[in-house]
Image (cartoon, coloured by chain):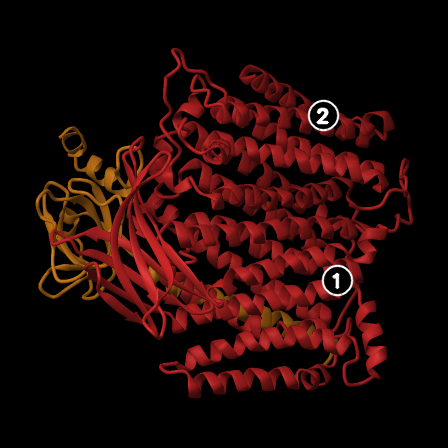
């Protein structure tokens, strides 16, 4: 190979590598990014069966049920619609009734959301930012804050 | 004292402006007096910032609640250590720490840079001063830590309980020493662009600073990871959380910089690329500061909570990143390209390293920023988490790790890949053995797990091979070998140690992810549970009282083979009344290199408690490997050629005094 051919092959190799990395990145973004929904959004959202999403809202009052062992069931609500959620594991320290929560997981065929992680990160108002924004957008923020 | 601190901060801001303007014009007009202003001003600026920081720390230590920042983040019942560390456990205080470290590095350049060419030194200090000035302005305008409250409250609102921890005392200073340490590399790069000239002695200067920054950043990330591991009670060591990514991106880019600086120093090649990397690394540090400090992370709308701060840092970001890249575009063509080399050579291996590391940095950057972009464009809220990073970052890292042992053994300019492969036969055999042993003798080991263990052994043995080959093991007589071993440059040991540390961390990660076990169950007092051959008995919950919290301690007895208690593990639910917050204190028992980890959940109505247990094999190696990497960097810093000092330039500009040694 001449010097020019060598240089070209090195550059082509580098470009192929970068191309593969870019392709992989965008494939992964399409496959692995999970969307955030509030319960009322779900009626209009078209979800694939088994698609991972993040579901956020308030933990509805009086719905927390402790089942067998470490399994917990509760409802997540945005004061318009509610979704039943089950979760096996340790709930975060900040998990409370009528507080904001984000759960991540998939829907079971019977419409129950099976969460594999539950987050209750908070700011001063004990409200994850996505949930606070969602509630504000739905116009129920004041109501949920004052009660 | 508080007003003194505030005043010192204002003075430091004014001095930073002087440090920016005077040496810069001095260098342009070749005025030695003006250039000489930079040094003393940088040292004084550091002293004033230190005074200011001390004032804040004293206000915290003495619980002066007339200072709003102290009132918001401290409590008189906190132990003294957390009353002091609380000074940087909040936005304002941590920004003050940031500039303190920035001015500290500026002062170091002033103190040790006497053998730098005068114009380069003046320009470096000017750029450093400019960064300082913008951040002083940021603090004074939007994040003043010294604002007073009138009337003063009687009691503070307490430091966030999860930050009341020794890990937090050490983590931010280490992390900032790393983050901000890269500012020196940035300043050197911009100074070189202003001068339009760059040579090997420039690389000799930049490399030790990169090493220092990289060493601290490694420590900071490892510390942060360990803190998250034991404090959050989730048992994970890395969450691909945007805040973690913010510190990981400069680390990846800094690692690339570390390697390309070697090529530049030794072979005068990759000059322009090294310079660009130095700019990018610090830009990523700035971006990290922006992401963490603006609150933009969880949502773009976090701007709404305090728009001035976010917008201000965004302006700083645009100014420095945009400015330096524009300067790069204008001036890079002036810089001469360096030596040529064959693709299969030490240089080639280091280029490959750079290709992989910068691509990996880019994937982390995309994954971190993508949700922000999507939300800004379409109002859809998405999150990019571990699954994305495992799919992109993993495949990029594995081939890089596979080629690591080849690099240090290849010759400069033109290497012989077959000879190197031959020398690595022993390491390869050891790795293969590790794969077979794992696959055959460990229950439930998947193919991936076995290959992972093999990869780790390949790295570890490869690092040892490097030292063995270079000291002539098996080739020369033992006496000669020992003498050669002792005579090896420290930087060779540094490289080997750093690569060894990488292997240990890999082994820890593979061990924990592939062989770890986990159980969640609800337990009554007196019940026992089995986990990976360990038997634990739950003894019950006992209330206890701390200085500013009360807790329920769950006691677990680790039972030996004969049924006797060999250790007691305690996990607690703490409640801090000042913030009405509950935290979980995990219980950890270290057995060899592995750990038993347990954390308490909620109490059931029947007196049972939810318990989550993990067996984490080799988990301590994850952070132990980080410490070994730091030791490698320290070893490399002790190298003779760095102690003796960089040779002076051939064409000495006026005012170069080649006398003092490097730090």
The chain that hosts pointer 1 is B
Residue that lies at the very extreme toward the top in this rendered image: B151
At x 81%, y 29%, the residue is B35
- Callout 1: few (<14), some (14-19), or many (20+) C-alpha neighbours within 10 Å? many
Q: Residue B158's image quarter? A: top left
| Residue under disc 2 on the same chain as residue under disc 1 | yes
Colour displayed for chain A in the image of the structure: orange
Q: Which residue is mark 2?
A: B44
Q: Residue B325's image quarter? A: top right
Q: Is residue B558 left or right of residue B237?
A: left
Q: Position of residue B78 (x, y in %)?
A: 42, 32
Chain-order first, disc 2 or disc 1: 2
The chain that hosts pointer 2 is B
Question: Secondary structure under badge 1?
Answer: helix
Asked whether residue B186 is in view, the answer is: yes
Q: Residue B484's image quarter? A: bottom right
Chain ID, red in image: B
The numbered mark at residue B202 is: none
Q: Position of residue A117 (x, y in %)?
A: 26, 56
- Callout 2: few (<14), some (14-19), or many (20+) C-alpha neighbours within 10 Å? some
Q: Quadrant of the N terminus of chain B?
A: top right
At x 59%, y 84%, the residue is B430
At x 12%, y 49%, the residue is A64
Question: Secondary structure under badge 2?
Answer: helix
**Observer-nearest of B589 and B404:** B589
At x 39%, y 81%, the residue is B445
Q: Which residue is mark 1?
A: B491
Task: Tell me if residue B593 comes above or below residue B420 in the rendering.
Answer: above
Q: Position of residue B581 (x, y in %)?
A: 29, 38
Q: Quadrant of the C terminus of chain B?
A: top right
Tag 2 and tag 1, C-beta contact below 8 Å: no
**Observer-nearest of B222 and B85:** B85
């Amino acid at each position: 190979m001449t010097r020019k051919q060598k240089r070209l092959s090195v550059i082509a190799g580098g470009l192929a590598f970068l191309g593969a990395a870019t392709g992989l990145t965008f494939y992964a973004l399409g496959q692995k990014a999970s969307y955030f929904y509030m319960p009322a959004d779900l009626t209009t959202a078209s979800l694939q069966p088994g698609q991972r999403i993040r579901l956020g809202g308030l933990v509805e009052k009086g719905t927390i049920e402790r089942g067998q062992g470490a399994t917990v069931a509760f409802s997540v609500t945005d004061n318009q619609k509610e979704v039943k959620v089950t979760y096996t594991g340790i709930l975060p320290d900040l998990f409370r009734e009528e507080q904001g929560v984000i759960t991540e997981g998939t829907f079971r065929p019977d419409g129950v959301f099976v969460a594999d992680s539950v987050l209750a990160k908070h700011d001063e108002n004990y409200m994850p930012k996505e949930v606070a924004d969602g509630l504000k957008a739905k116009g129920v923020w004041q109501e949920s804050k004052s009660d | 004292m508080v007003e003194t601190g505030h005043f010192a901060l204002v003075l430091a801001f004014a001095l930073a402006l002087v440090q920016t303007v005077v040496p810069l014009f001095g260098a342009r007009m070749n005025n030695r007096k003006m250039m000489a202003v930079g040094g003393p001003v940088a040292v004084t600026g550091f002293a004033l910032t230190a005074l200011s920081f001390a004032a804040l720390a004293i206000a915290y230590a003495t619980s002066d609640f007339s200072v709003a920042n102290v009132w918001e983040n401290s409590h008189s019942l906190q132990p003294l250590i957390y009353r002091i560390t609380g000074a940087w456990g909040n936005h304002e205080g941590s920004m003050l720490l940031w500039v303190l470290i920035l001015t500290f590095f500026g002062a170091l350049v002033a103190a040790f840079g006497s053998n730098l060419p005068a114009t380069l030194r003046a320009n470096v200090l000017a750029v450093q001063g400019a960064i300082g000035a913008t951040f002083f302005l940021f603090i004074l305008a939007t994040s003043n830590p010294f604002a007073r409250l009138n009337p003063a409250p009687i009691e503070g609102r307490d430091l966030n309980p999860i930050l009341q921890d020794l890990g937090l005392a050490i983590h931010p200073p280490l992390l900032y020493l790393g983050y901000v340490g890269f500012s020196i590399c940035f300043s050197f790069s911009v100074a070189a662009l202003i001068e339009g000239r760059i040579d090997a002695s420039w690389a000799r200067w930049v490399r030790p600073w990169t090493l220092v920054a990289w060493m601290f950043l490694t420590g900071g990330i490892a510390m942060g990871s360990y803190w998250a591991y034991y404090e959050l009670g989730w048992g994970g060591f890395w969450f691909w959380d945007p805040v973690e990514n913010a510190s990981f991106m400069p680390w990846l880019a800094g690692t690339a910089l570390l390697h390309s600086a070697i090529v530049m120093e030794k072979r005068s090649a990759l000059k322009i690329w090294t310079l660009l990397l130095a700019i990018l690394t610090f830009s990523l540090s700035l971006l990290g500061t922006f992401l963490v400090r603006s609150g933009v992370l969880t949502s773009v709308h976090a701007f709404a909570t305090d728009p001035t701060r976010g917008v201000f840092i965004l302006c700083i970001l645009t100014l420095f990143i945009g400015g330096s890249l524009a300067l790069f575009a204008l001036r890079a063509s002036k810089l001469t390209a360096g030596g040529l080399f064959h693709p299969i050579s030490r240089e080639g291996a280091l280029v490959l390293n750079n290709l992989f590391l910068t691509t990996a940095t880019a994937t982390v950057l995309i994954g971190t920023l993508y949700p922000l972009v999507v939300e800004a464009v379409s109002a859809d809220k998405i999150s990019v988490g571990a699954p994305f990073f495992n799919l992109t970052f993993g495949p990029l890292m594995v081939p890089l790790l596979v080629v690591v042992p080849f690099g240090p053994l290849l010759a400069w300019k033109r290497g012989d890949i077959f000879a190197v492969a031959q020398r690595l036969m022993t390491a390869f055999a050891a790795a293969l053995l590790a794969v077979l042993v794992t696959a055959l003798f460990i229950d439930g080991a998947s193919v991936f797990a076995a290959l992972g263990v093999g990869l780790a052994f390949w790295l570890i043995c490869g690092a040892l091979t490097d030292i063995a080959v270079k000291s002539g093991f098996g080739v020369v007589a033992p006496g000669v070998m020992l003498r050669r071993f002792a005579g090896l440059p420290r930087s060779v040991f540094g490289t080997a140690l750093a690569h060894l540390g990488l292997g240990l961390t890999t082994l820890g990660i593979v061990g924990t992810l592939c062989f770890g076990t986990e159980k969640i169950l609800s337990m009554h007092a007196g019940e026992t549970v089995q986990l990976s051959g360990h038997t634990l008995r739950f003894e019950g919950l006992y209330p206890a009282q701390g200085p500013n919290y009360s807790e329920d301690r769950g006691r677990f007895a680790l039972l030996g083979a004969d049924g006797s208690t060999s250790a007691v593990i305690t996990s607690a639910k703490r409640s801090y009344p000042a913030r009405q917050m509950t935290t979980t204190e995990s219980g950890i028992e270290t057995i060899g290199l592995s750990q038993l980890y347990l954390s308490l959940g909620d109490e059931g109505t029947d007196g049972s408690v939810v318990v989550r247990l993990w067996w984490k094999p080799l988990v301590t190696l994850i952070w132990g490997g980080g410490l070994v990497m730091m030791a490698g960097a320290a070893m490399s810093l002790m190298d003779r050629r760095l102690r003796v000092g960089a040779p002076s330039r051939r064409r000495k500009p006026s005012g170069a005094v080649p006398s003092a040694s490097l730090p």
